[in-house]
Image: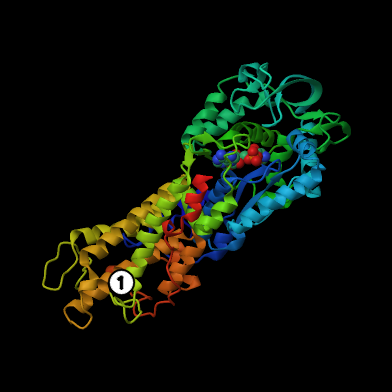
Amino acid sequence: MLRASVLRLLGRAGASRVSLLEDSGPRHYCSGSLRARDDACDARAYLTTPIFYVNAAPHIGHLYSALLADALCRHRRLIVPCAAATRFSTGTDEHGLKIQQAAATAGLAPTELCDRVSSQFQQLFREAGISSTDFIRTTEVRHQIAVQHFWGVLKTRGLLYKGLYEGWYCASDECFLPEAKVTRQPGSSGDSCPVSLESGHPVFWTKEENYIFRLSQFREPLQRWLRADPRAITPEPFHHAVLQWLEEELPDLSVSRKSSHLHWGIPVPGDDSQTIYVWLDALVNYLTVIGYPNAEFKSWWPATSHIIGKDILKFHAIYWPALLLGAGMSPPHRIYVHSHWTVCGQKMSKSLGNVVDPRTCLDRYTVDGFRYFLLRQGVPNWDCDYYDEKVVKLLDSELADALGGLLNRCTANRINPSGTYPVFCTTCFPSEPGLVGPSVRAQAEDYALVSAVATLPKQVTDHYDNFQIYKALEALSSCVRQTNGFVQRHAPWKLNWENPVDAPWLGTVLHVALECLRVFGTLLQPVTPSLADKLLSRLGVSATERSVGELYFLPRFYGHPCPFEGRKLGPDTGLLFPRLDQSRAWLVKAHRT
Ligand code: ME8
């Protein structure tokens, strides 16, 4: 049996199955058993990031998209532990006028530029622990086959015609713009230059004969799709925005360019004088990865979730579903949309020279530290601002002090000399709140802590489901604070193992805190995989005991045996996360330069 809420998270396949999280047994049990691996393998989900342009090196915005997808994917794997059930693709978008021009400016052949920058993306994602199963480059032969096949299907279905296209084109955004979306800005020589109202990038007038897709036919089908599935585009404000766009007229879309202007792309089948529009080419990558046009792709489509930035919403929420419908296929299951990172209040751009290099950040803050920062601070609904001090402050307070400090308090030799998971005493901490007696030591706040941590896995899953990973981390961080409060309240360092009155309660306090840490470690795996591994290994939690299905928080409280009780802790491998503010020489230096 699988949890419906979880299946809903990332894929349509299997979504009708029964939920264990929702129908689990004891109230505080965060999960039931999740052992039906064959079933799990049937519940397929396919996650994608955008494929990134290779005109410039990756920045933190690209890494953020990949991290969101990675965290969703890793969280899903915690719940559906069958490796074959989840597919996760990323890649590079290598064709089009933008790349053709960037290569010319750099004095490189387009293939050289593509190889160089694509490998920078691959290296960054490897270093950042992005657990993708596929990396696609649109210059691969398999992709050309898929795009030309897809084109052929549209053609056969009568959805492409030749016509004269006249209008504005923005090479930076690779899109056509109506007059209403163009404004004027003073250029370098004082003359007025037409630019895109949305992106501010220059546009130029184009007039040529192209192939045109009958996009206008799809306005109503798109409206029906979105109205029938209010979560198709998540979070909701983006869903709403797309429906608003669909209120307006939807003109047909030019889907090819003259090869004499654009040679760097995939030729239109049977007409070498035209090159396929780069967005049609790019969007089909999602099908290429899963084997299209071979029938195998049907086992992953449409159980697909696209993770994208808000800048490319129109392409994914209007053009792509319309193209799919045109080709006789379903729209993707979900489109998860996030906003942008700005830097010190400004849009990140090469010309402003404020692009933040993600590899420097991974070096400075560690892979886990920077992953945690981006996912904890990034809010999909709004733009977020980046500056170095914010990273240091967050990581020092939440990872080094709160979480690392808590682990240290419960495992340090001085307080836990036997180096074990101590025994939980049901007399000191009875499952019934409000009991009084000479041995009862638990207080009302302690019951509140148990309840908060018991419900945390479900809360976290719900936040992932709603693409609000930062809220999952906020809830987790609040539970860490509560657990520190619990330890502080009972001051185990003032209790004595030698004293028969103190000892059962001392063991219980440590047991509860270690149980909380086990939940935190398990739930942090999608965000900070190495740190979570270090934490769980220190607690003596084996590799097979780390899925959400194996959590069983504080079973002794509910009258069940606890497999950890009395178990030796794992080896002490040093601080969980060393404070950063001690080693801030680079930060001070960075500000002086
Ligand atoms: O648009 N903050 O590629 P691209 C957060 N090739 N995320 C950001 C960001 C920022 N400041 N800047 C970029 C393309 N991103 C096309 C996509 S998909 C079939 C083709 C992220 O290199 C975000 O995900 O311009 C955004 O949508 C994407 O990078 C755009 O990357």
- Residue at disc 1, secondary structure: helix
**Circle 1 crowding by C-alpha within 10 Å: few under 14, some 14–19, many from 20:** many
Along the viewing direction, whichever of 535 and 217 lies nearer the viewer? 535
Q: Give the x, y percent position of residue 127.
A: 61, 58
| Left or right: 551 in relation to 91 | left
Does residue 3 sit above or below 430 in this rendering? Answer: above
The residue that appears at 52% across and 53% down in the rendered structure is: 71
Q: Which image quarter: residue 205?
A: top right
The residue that appears at 58% across and 50% down in the rendered structure is: 358
User: Can you tell me which quadrant of the image ligand 1 is in?
Assistant: top right
Along the viewing direction, whichever of 253 and 158 lies nearer the viewer? 253
Which three-letter amino acid code belongs to the residue tagged 1? Answer: His
State the residue position of label 1. Answer: 511
The residue that appears at 71% across and 48% down in the rendered structure is: 117
Q: Give the x, y percent position of residue 303.
A: 60, 48
| Left or right: 26 in relation to 191 | left
From this viewpoint, is residue 450 visible? no
Q: Give the x, y percent position of residue 263.
A: 84, 35
From this viewpoint, is residue 61 visible? yes
Q: Which image quarter: residue 199?
A: top right
Along the viewing direction, whichever of 522 and 186 lies nearer the viewer? 186
- Report the residue that reaches farthest toward the front: 592
Quadrant into which the C terminus falls: top right
Which of the colour schemes (rainbow, by chain, secondary structure, one colour) is used? rainbow
| Left or right: 323 in relation to 234 | right
